Amino acid sequence: MTDVVRRAAFGCLLVPVVLLWCGCSPAGAAGAAYGLAAVTDTCRLLARRSQRAATRPPSDSP
């Protein structure tokens, strides 16, 4: 999972740089970076939660 998070962080840094290079406003690039960081953090949280649920032993509920 750490490899995926590393790649996502790289994308969060690379996208605003490319947007600035292509002539986007700094506010637009910052907004894109913030949005990507929020999505990345949410996905990381959900993946961690799913991983914990998968390692939990099954319950004996009917």
Image: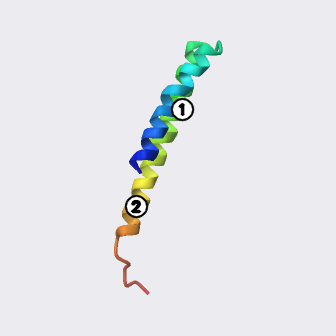
Residue 57 as seen in the image, left or right of residue 34: left
**Mark 2 surroundings within 10 Å by alpha-carbon count, few (fewer than 14), some (14 through 19), many (20 or more):** few
Which mark, residue 21?
A: none
Element on which disc 1 rests: helix
| Residue at disc 2, secondary structure | helix
* Dot 1 amino acid type: Gly
At horizontal 37% and vertical 80% (from top left) the residue drawn is 59
Residue 9: where, in percent of width, then height?
45, 35
Q: Which residue bears the numbered disc 1? A: 35
Callout 2 amino acid: Gln
Measuring 48% from the left and 27% from the top, which residue is drawn there? 13
The image shows residue 16 at horizontal and vertical percentages of 55, 22
Locate residue 7, reporting x and y percent. Answer: 47, 39
Q: Does residue 50 lie above or below 33 as drawn? A: below
29 on left or right of 56: right
Out of 42 and 17, give the one closest to the viewer: 17
Q: Residue at x 46, y 46 (%)?
A: 4
Viewer-proximal residue among 34 and 11: 11
Residue 51 shows which numbered tag? 2
Residue lying farthest to the bottom in this orientation: 62
Which colour assignment does the render follow? rainbow
Does residue 50 sit above or below 30 in this rendering?
A: below
